[in-house]
Amino acid sequence: MIRQELIVPVSELIARHATARPGKVAYSDSRGRVTYGELARVTANLAGHLQDAGVEAGDSVAIFLPNSVQWVETCFATLRAGAVSVPISYDSTAHEVGYRLEDAQCKVIVTTDERYPMVRELLQANPQLTTVILLERGDTPGVGLRYADLRAREARSVPRDPDSIDDTSFIVYTSGTTGRAKGVLLTQRGMLWVTAACWTPVAGLSEHDCVLSPLPLFHSYALNLSVLSILAVGASERILEKFSTSEVMTLLQSGEFTLMPGVPTMFHYLLEAARNTPDCRFPGLRACISAGAIMPAPVNQEFEQRFGVKLLDGYGITETSTMVTMNWLEGGRVMGSCGLPVPGLTVRLIDPATGRDVEPGQEGELIVRGPNVMKGYHRKPAETATALRDGWYYTGDLARSDLNGFLTITGRLKELVIRGGQNIAPAEVEEAVCAFAAVLDCAVVGAPHEHLGEVPVVFVVARPGMTVLPDALIAHCRERLSAYKVPAAVHLVPEIPRTGSGKIVRFRLKDTLKADQG
């Protein structure tokens, strides 16, 4: 069942498809496209130029680009140079980018002229960052390396094209309950194992698919499915820079696309739009895939009834190279469930207090063991030791299993707020809020949201004699946090409930929200 022939170095996959289907479009966006034959040539050029610029095996290369064909090319070129890809959200603030550059010790960053002023300000604090490659053919002074030039001409060096698929190839940052983003160390073997064990047998992904992907490529979900898996099977994909309901509706109605991955919020928006266009259908679309957050059963059912297209829900996390469970394209399903464990994975539900397995129907912490589990957290041995124990990854998520093995996520031991599939660490937002002069204390919790699942809101205690103006606090947060992390509301309170050891009692704050809404 597991497609072992897909679990090989990226360079081998590129060469395989360049020979078998050189003229087939591999990836396209609104500005251009690249065929498999071209992909072999341009990634070889880019990899050689990275090596000419001093990139050694194991060095890190930051990808600070919007969704695009160039994003994918840069990722593959980095791997062919034997280096480590460090994806960074294009919407990140300078503070967030700077932390990742320093933590991963990035030697090269590939970005745009638009983001160059931000990057230039970060150079002094990151002396290891010796090379900046800009995407456009602009006239930004002081920048000698242009992506288009490197892509088009041969380099002095030939790509290293390492044989090992067990070395770290990606450092993907995910928010943690400590508030500091954690770099998850992932390998090509682990990522492509998910392709071979999940996307091909479970979702039926193959060379015959034409995929429409609105997912942000810096996320592990998209990196796994929309970047690596497309290459592995030799499919074609249209990459959207950002999700747009109207654009996705138009493209799906064209009949060109067979598969679309997304997060629950996207499918909710498509349903909302379809209510105004009753005759809307998606010819050619055989399935959609949802992950990143819990899919409400009513949305799943309504989507399938409205469009006549299966919407497969699954559960995945960065630390397991994405997917842990998935609903199958064929066979029975339990609506509201995130499906069955991916073949080849061992999944347990345990009592967090005793470590013993719970009975079907009982809630327990989900732990996972398999070839897709991360190597650890970059430069965080204590956090790694807590998460990885005796070969098991402890997810911190709570779930129940029915008698047939279908899992349903019920909650989180972790305190992450999941906004439309985006993980938000309360402590990270609290750090930004507490930097506001008038704030004495604060706490962040998730508030229910009809479309996004939940959004962060902040409870604030003002300093004596000072006033916290909500609009001013929100503006302050926008300067320090990505847009999706900015609190949706500010609640002024006399004190933050805490335990005797000082930990925030967040459920009391959530109870306050429920009382206010009631």
Image (cartoon, rainbow, N blue to C red):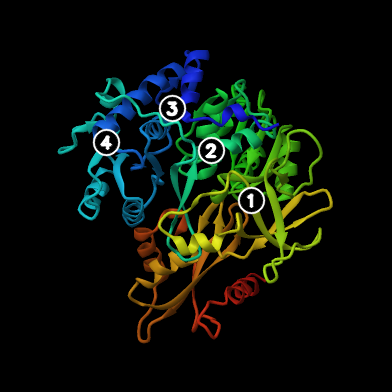
| Front: mark 3 or 2 | 2
Return the disc, 4 or 3, that comes first in the chain's sequence. Answer: 3
On screen, residue 429 above or below 144: below
Q: Is residue 245 visible?
A: no
Residue 384 percent location from the top left of the image:
50, 59
Q: State the residue position of label 4.
A: 133
* Picture quadrant of residue 109: top left
Q: State the residue position of label 1.
A: 369
What secondary structure is marked by label 4?
strand
Q: CA distance from mark 4 to mark 2?
A: 28 Å
Estimate how packed mark 1 is, as few (under 14), some (14 to 19) or many (20 or more) residues with alpha carbons within 10 Å: many
Q: CA distance from mark 1 to mark 3?
A: 40 Å
Residue occupying image coordinates x 27% and y 36%: 133
Estimate how packed mark 3 is, as few (under 14), some (14 to 19) or many (20 or more) residues with alpha carbons within 10 Å: few
Return the disc, 4 or 2, that comes first in the chain's sequence. Answer: 4
Label 4 with label 1: CB-CB less than 8 Å: no
On screen, residue 78 above or below 390: above
Amino acid on which disc 2 is placed: Arg
Image quarter in which the C terminus is found = bottom right
Q: State the residue position of label 2.
A: 189
